[in-house]
Amino acid sequence: MSSHAGIAQAHGGTVLRDSVNGQTGNCRVGHAPGFDFAISQASRDAMLVQLADGELDLALGIFPDLPKDIRVETLFEEDFVCLADKATVPGKGALSLEEWLSRPHVMLALRPDANDEIERALAAKGLKRRIAVALPHWSAAVELLPGTDLVLTIARRAVGPLRSFRELRQFAPPRQLQLPKMAYQQAWHIRKDSDPALNWMRDVVMNCCRPEEK
């Protein structure tokens, strides 16, 4: 890894952003004399190609299907929560499986046919949801929810405080879905295993994702 570091995160990179923002005392990216950082967003498939081609030093995201020449390190595990307008959620604060499936959904993705962890879990049970809107940015997705019957199912860390969205309610996905926990990871090519600069960068990212000691 040269003094110019290429780092990309998946389109749902809000998860890492919020984790880092919550642990700023552990982050030292700003104290890296001689380093220039180019940070971008891309799909997980595009990032794996860029790692293989040497266009990218480090990728951050969820990588269920890895080529043999890509190494990964888990930063944290994450589960899913749902968000919807309070007026459209029953008083008990959750939706049944039938209600959840009948509602239009917002999907965080670069394209509507993306086969993410939620779609895989649904397919394994022979189920399908209707994706009414697919877009790559968390903030835009949340702003679509008030005053509609849309449902957004998203990684818990990506939610953050809902003070600006008092119309929304957070609730658990239907338990029958058995949505798996996600391993949010950093990935690099094996040819970079012994690169001291990349090893330093990986340590920085890992420290940013660790809870601060009380």
Image: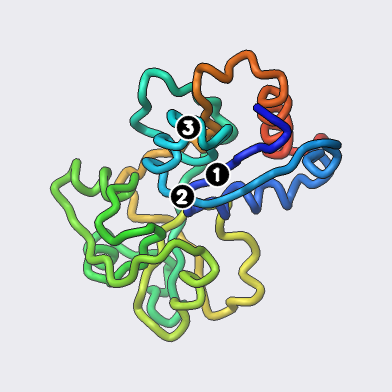
Between 156 and 75, the one nearer to me in the picture: 75
Q: Amino acid at mark 1?
A: Ala
Could you tell which of marks 3 and 1 lies nearer the N-terminus? 1
Residue underneath mark 2 = 42
Tell me the element at label 2. strand
Residue 52's x, y, as percent?
A: 43, 28
Residue underneath mark 1 = 8
Considering only vertical position in the picture, is 18 above or below 196?
A: below
Could you tell which of marks 3 and 2 lies nearer the N-terminus? 2
Q: Amino acid at mark 3?
A: Leu
- Assess whether mark 2 and mark 3 are in contact (beta carbons under 8 angstroms): no
Q: Amino acid at mark 2?
A: Ala
Residue located at (38% from left, 39% from top): 180
Q: Residues within 10 Å of mark 3 (few under 14, many from 20)?
A: many
Residue underneath mark 3 = 51
Residue 104's x, y, as percent?
A: 28, 71
User: Gap in Å between the C-alphas at discs 3 and 2?
Assistant: 12 Å
Between 78 and 176, the one nearer to me in the picture: 78
Q: How many marks?
A: 3
Q: Residues within 10 Å of mark 2 (few under 14, many from 20)?
A: many
Tell me the element at label 1. strand
**Left or right: 78 in relation to 111:** right
Residue located at (45% from left, 56% from top): 154
Could you tell which of marks 2 and 1 lies nearer the N-terminus? 1
**Left or right: 38 in relation to 45:** right
Tell me the element at label 3. helix
- Assess whether mark 1 and mark 2 are in contact (beta carbons under 8 angstroms): yes
Residue located at (48% from left, 32% from top): 51
Q: Which mark is residue 175?
A: none
Considering only vertical position in the picture, is 86 above or below 96?
A: below
